[in-house]
Amino acid sequence: MANKWKSGRQGTGYWLYYMATGKNWDLLFIKYPVGSYIVPHNDFIPGKRHYRLNILLWGEQTFRAHGPTIINWGPFVLFRSDTTKHEVKTSNRLRLVLSFGIALEEKKKGLTFPPGP
């Protein structure tokens, strides 16, 4: 993926800069100009558990999780973006976020170890 700013997929004024990507992960800057926002949503990846760590580098803490977070301390928010609905309220000043996401295989249910015959 080319390193350049791209408009966010929701078209609500925020911008993404992919610093690095792998098969199941990404590292990006997110820029929220004044007036930008993200509506409540989940980030589903079929068959995966999607974790995201957001670190607020500059600006207001306008991120809102509508469900459980793993860490929500100061500028750090770690959450499952596939199961926790989340949004970014309208920014009143420039906001910069460093975001790391990883998609892990869904845990298999009903398996025991060692496997039976």
Image: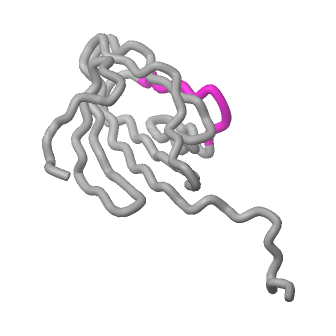
Relative image position of residue 3 (x, y in whole percent): 15, 48
Q: Is residue 35 left or right of residue 79?
A: left
Residue 23 lies in what quarter of the image?
bottom left
- Residue in view at x 48 percent, y 46 percent: 52
Q: Is residue 50 above or below residue 57?
A: below
Question: How was this image coloured?
Answer: one colour
Q: Residue furthest right?
A: 117
Q: Nearer the viewer, residue 105 or 93?
A: 105
Stretch in magenta: 61-69
Q: Is residue 104 above or below residue 54?
A: below
Q: Residue furthest bottom?
A: 117
Does the segment drawn in magenta span residue 58? no
Task: Report the quarter where the C terminus lies.
Answer: bottom right
Relative image position of residue 109 (x, y in whole percent): 77, 62
Q: Is residue 44 left or right of residue 107?
A: left
- Residue in view at x 29 percent, y 45 percent: 28
Q: Residue furthest front?
A: 117
Total marks in image? 0
Relative image position of residue 99 (x, y in whole percent): 37, 44
Relative image position of residue 51 (x, y in whole percent): 52, 49
Q: Is residue 112 above or below residue 109?
A: below
- Residue in view at x 43 percent, y 41 percent: 54
Residue 34 lies in what quarter of the image?
top left
